[in-house]
Amino acid sequence: MAAFTPARRASIVPRMPRHMTCHLAVSLLGAASTALAQAPRVTPAGDPSVRSATIYALAVDSTQHRGERFVYLLDDGVVRIEADGRGSRTYRQVVQILTREAVENWAELSFSYSPGRERLVVNWARVVRPGGAGVAAQPTHEQESLAPVAEANPVYTDLKLRRLSLGGVVPGTIVDYSYTVETTQPVMPGDFLSQWRVTTGRLVRRSRLVVDVPAAMTPRIKEDNVRFPRRTTERAERRTYVWATNDVPKLETEPFAADPNTVEVYVNLAAPLSWNDVARWYAELSRDRYALTPQIEARLAEIVVAARTLEDSIRAAHRWVAQDFRYVSLSLGIGGYQPRPPAAVFEAQYGDCKDKATLFIALLRRMGVAAYPVLLAQSGGVERELPSPRQFNHMIAALERPGTSGYTFVDLTAELVPFGQLPPVEQGKFALVVRPDGRGEEVTLPEDSVVANRSVIRVEGELSATGEFRGRFTRTGTGSRQYPLREVFSRPLTPTERDRLTRALAGETFQGALGDSLEAFDGRDLAAEARLSVAILGARATSNAGGADILTLPIDNMAAPGLVSELESRGPRRFPIDAAAVIGPFEYVAELRLTLPAGWRARLPNAVAAASAFGSYRSEYVQDGRLLRVTRQLTGARGILPPDRITDLVDWVRSMSRDDVRYIVLEHP
């Protein structure tokens, strides 16, 4: 998928997935007062507000932390912001290494920054013993290079990586490093965004976040589950905010944990901007990027020549831009935000998300259809209370179709997604529609119903008196369940590939079966039904059991006793439960329709029906004359439920697991 290429922050590879974290007990701040009058100036000479010796003295006894790979003795951030968005961010971590596995994480450090807009200074990176004795005062190797470019969906950026190798890192040592990234030219004037996750998944002995802003500025602050006081001080026309605490416990993850929740602790800050400010900025940035050349207009005429209606023309333009322009991102400088003109995209025959969306919007406007750019974070997670372009990493298009109400949203990088649908990862997410006059419209992207995302597997055929099966296996998909099928057939298969796929499908249905007559579809034909089918021959479907045959069911078993045991073994739950994460927001149907030999009877298991807030399940076992029909249907759900509903989840999975039927006994004369 494309990336809108938001402003990047310096990052450190070994850090946990949490952007930056923070806290620090005041008693160990050394020269710092209870409430800092101003942010400390951290340089390669050190941090005047923190005494390293007191931090090293916090080293833990590894025998009391078995199972832990490392702990944070200090997690510290100092952020200084100016009114125009310039500023600096200084981060320091002191990490105690407990196991050999942690050495692999922390002996190599990597930082990233954008040289056109930022400056990076590694203040220090050293290895010491718990008592403070030095092991390595500086890195043994240091190298800077451009960020690597992936072969698939390449993104070319001016991002630089600085990599450091530390010597002497072994279990029992302490890695202490600090770096500063100075923002010299913000992408959007006045914009800044600082996102912190206080709980890290590891024990944090001391941690602190300091934010220093002009006294005339009131930043937007969003605190999630912060249960320790924030201290605010004003002095010399500056205001300083300090969040400090100590001994943040390790946060154990739980299955199906929902976000937001009441467990994880965040501190997020942004400039006092509005989403309309962001929309005006982008509208101005892209104002001159919608002009079409005569060559593009001529090609458009060829693309829509067979269209009978305006709707046909829109769909033809969508398929052209989505499928015939490959994805390549040139996110250099302001190009990370500003789309290239359609002429440049047309000539190169490639573009990233903003390039392709802009070309499509220009084509639709040429047809007289109102269309607009839409900014979003592809996987969600936007904090609506903190307007900033840095929250976005993707762009799609919105159009107002004649005769319909509301918007139709289109992702031009999703080449296998039919027109009018969105990739599942984008559905239900916050987005910002940008009007040509700079007005911004906050929207929630449409979300398919659970049952619209449907996968159906059918095995139909006849069983001989010798236990051989002849029939067909068929799979269809709609909504989010169509894309695995479309991906398989997104290009023509070679004869060898078709043969391998045919044999694999038959063998997975019945062991040792032969496949034939594969029926496929063109995965790039967005109007085609996502469907495959294969004939199954020579399958030994039963085994003899002394006067009866045992039929191995060729459809999935949904029983999950292991999940029941895992959930019950965890003790009291803390996180709310994301119902969509349990099964998924889709419906799965599997059906066997088997014609038995004359006189054969099946010992039918009991049907199972189980419904809950987390989904529903039902199974059915029926024989009507010679026809044996087995059906299993599992439907997921959406919603966030409180932690105490874990009992309901366990009960539902246990009820569903009663249908642990893998074989059916077939009696015959």
Image (spheres, rainbow, N blue to C red):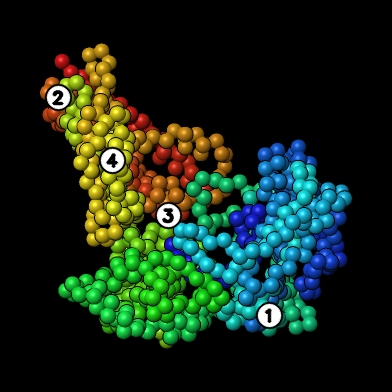
Percent position of residue 52, x then y: 84, 58
Pointer 2 residue: 597
Point 49% across, 48% down: residue: 256
Pick whichever of labels 3 and 4 is earlier in the sequence: 4
Q: What element carries label 1?
A: loop
Pick whichever of labels 1 and 4 is earlier in the sequence: 1
User: Which circle, 2 or 3, is nearer the viewer?
Assistant: 2
Quadrant the C terminus occupies: top left
Asked if residue 365 lies left or right of residue 73, the reply is: left
Mark 3: amino acid:
Gly
Point 70% across, 81% down: residue: 214
Pick whichever of labels 4 and 2 is earlier in the sequence: 4
Q: Is mark 4 on a helix, strand or loop?
A: helix
Q: Is mark 3 on a helix, strand or loop?
A: loop
Percent position of residue 395, x then y: 44, 70
Point 57% across, 56% down: residue: 262
473 or 490, which lies in front?
490
Q: Distance between the residues labelled 2 and 3?
A: 47 Å
User: Which circle, 1 or 4, is nearer the viewer?
Assistant: 4
Pointer 2: residues within 10 angstroms few (<14), some, or many (20+)?
some
- Residue 639: which numbered mark, if any? 3
Asked if residue 576 lies left or right of residue 26, the reply is: left
Mark 4: amino acid:
Asp
Mark 1: amino acid:
Glu
Q: Is mark 2 on a helix, strand or loop?
A: loop
Asked if residue 170 lies left or right of residue 425, the reply is: right
In the image, residue 168 sits, relative to residue 270, either above or below, namely: above
- Residue 82: which numbered mark, if any? 1
